[in-house]
Image (cartoon, helix red, strand yellow):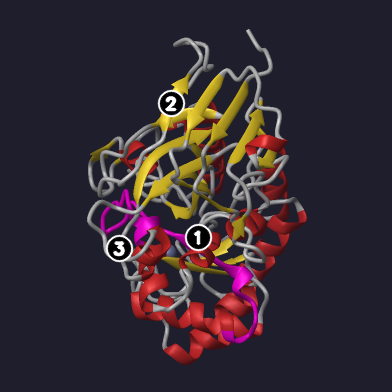
């Protein structure tokens, strides 16, 4: 059964747009149809009649759902890296509604021969397309490129639906010249690329320095603050200044280097390139609140307005990754996050409390116009939480 499903959100206290050009929007109401935002503004001006789902935001803040630009999923909601179940559901409770794979590198027995790595990438793309853990959108099927791949291999991958490369440098391709050729082949067929930046992450991966990153010219400078070992400061600054690619800062990296990269982006007038990831699951673990922790860390220690840092984890990532979510505007996916100041947090309001280094509390998440979680089991409790006044009958939500 498919009918137009209407979502109405009323009494929003603050709208974070996700757009770095204008991080805060006027309004108190949002309407979505069939999982897409159709209108944002004041309730008195919008058509709010006959909703299938009605949310009273109770004065909480509305943000686009957070995007984790750098995850290493394997299969379903299980990671063998730290033997954890339901880690993606835990991240949903940390406000993450979309994840982008930087390679399914933790698969035990991961194939490194070319036909095997292609087969696994195609299968991974399919199993996350077909199964969204707790509703979270996981873009996966990101092959780790190996020596010997030819142009035809990239065409085959693209023809089969693969849209991402795993981190360049995690496989046998570590030289700039070979990486450059393969990244160019990938780009020719519409496949986005990310390069590992910095020292080896775990035994088996290697050093990728600024010269290799610049020569390879991947779309995203993956974990510019190291994953975990960062490049020297002068190389990080040089990477920000020398190309126009995405500046990805991750939780499982060097925090000081992350602040340096962010400040450099502001200094050169290009904060729109800054995007955030956790780089988890990894040796450093899995961080359900990792993106919120990055927002609080960069805002407080880097002295940037919290509403601007939210854009790094939403609209910036959507633009650099060509996603249809990440901003609160008509036509975008209704992937929403309701947050409020954590109970007993200092600061005159939620944004001030984040700028002092505190996490907000998550009160609800929505993906494609469907409520996926209510008061977070993982964040500090929010002062105010939204109330779900009306919801479609169980089973009518469709699938996930
Ligand atoms: Zn890496």
Q: Earlier in the sequence, mark 1 or mark 3?
A: 1
Query: Mark 2 highlights which residue?
Result: 388
Query: Mark 1 highlights which residue?
Result: 310
> Farthest right residue?
188
Segment tinted magenta in the rendering: 267-293
Secondary structure of the residue carrying numbered label 2: strand
- The answer, for residue 266, to whether it is visible in the render is yes
Query: Mark 3 highlights which residue?
Result: 358
> Farthest front residue?
44
Q: Are marks 2 and 3 in contact (CB under 8 Å)?
A: no
279 in the magenta segment: yes
Location of residue 31 in the rendering, given as x and y in whole percent from the top left corner: 64, 33
In the rendered view, tell whether residue 398 sits above or below residue 243. Answer: above
Kindly report the distance in space between the C-alpha atoms of the residues bearing marks 1 and 3.
Answer: 14 Å
Location of residue 310 in the rendering, given as x and y in whole percent from the top left corner: 50, 60
Kindly report the distance in space between the C-alpha atoms of the residues bearing marks 1 and 2.
Answer: 24 Å
- Depth check: 312 or 380 in front? 380
Looking at the image, which residue is at 46% across and 66% down?
Answer: 306
The part of the image, by quadrant, that contains residue 221 is bottom right
Looking at the image, which residue is at 66% across and 12% down?
Answer: 2
In the rendered view, tell whether residue 342 sits above or below residue 293. Answer: above
Q: Is residue 286 left or right of residue 306?
A: left
Looking at the image, which residue is at 53% across and 66% down?
Answer: 308
In the rendered view, tell whether residue 371 sits above or below residue 104. Answer: above
- Depth check: 51 or 198 in front? 51
- The answer, for residue 149, to whether it is visible in the render is no
Secondary structure of the residue carrying numbered label 1: helix
């Amino acid at each position: 059964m498919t009918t137009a499903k209407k979502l109405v959100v009323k009494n929003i206290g603050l709208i974070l747009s996700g757009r770095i050009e204008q991080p805060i929007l006027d309004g108190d109401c949002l309407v979505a149809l069939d999982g897409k935002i159709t209108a944002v503004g004041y309730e008195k001006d919008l058509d709010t009649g006959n909703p299938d789902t009605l949310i009273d935001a109770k004065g909480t803040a509305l943000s686009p759902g957070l995007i984790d630009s750098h995850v290493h999923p394997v299969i379903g909601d299980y990671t063998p890296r730290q033997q954890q179940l339901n880690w993606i559901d835990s991240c949903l409770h940390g406000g993450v509604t979309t994840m982008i794979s930087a390679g399914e590198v933790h698969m035990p027995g991961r194939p490194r021969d070319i036909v095997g790595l292609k087969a696994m990438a195609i299968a991974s793309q399919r199993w996350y397309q077909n199964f969204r853990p707790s509703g979270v959108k996981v873009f996966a099927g990101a092959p780790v490129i190996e020596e010997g791949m030819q142009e035809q291999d990239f065409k085959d991958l693209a023809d089969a639906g693969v849209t991402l490369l795993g981190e360049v440098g995690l496989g046998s391709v570590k030289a700039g010249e070979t990486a450059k050729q393969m990244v160019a082949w990938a780009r020719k067929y519409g496949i986005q690329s990310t390069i590992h930046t910095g020292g080896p992450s775990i035994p088996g991966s290697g050093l990728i320095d600024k010269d290799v990153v610049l020569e390879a010219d991947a779309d995203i400078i993956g974990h510019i603050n190291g994953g975990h070992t960062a490049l020297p400061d002068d190389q990080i600054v040089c990477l920000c200044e020398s190309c126009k690619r995405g500046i990805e800062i991750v939780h499982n990296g060097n925090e000081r280097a992350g602040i340096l990269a962010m400040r450099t982006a502001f200094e050169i007038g290009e904060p729109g390139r800054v995007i955030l990831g956790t780089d988890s699951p990894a040796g450093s673990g899995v961080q359900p609140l990792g993106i919120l922790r990055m927002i609080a860390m960069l805002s407080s220690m880097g002295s940037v307005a919290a509403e601007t840092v939210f854009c790094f984890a939403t609209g910036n990532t959507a633009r650099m990754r060509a996603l249809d979510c990440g901003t609160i505007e008509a036509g975008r996916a209704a992937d929403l996050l309701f947050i409020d100041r954590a109970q007993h947090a200092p600061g005159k309001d939620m944004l001030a409390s984040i700028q002092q280094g505190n996490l907000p509390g998550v009160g609800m998440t929505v993906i494609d116009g469907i409520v996926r979680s209510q008061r977070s089991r993982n964040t500090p409790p929010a002062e105010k939480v939204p109330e779900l006044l009306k919801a479609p009958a169980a089973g009518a939500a469709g699938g996930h």
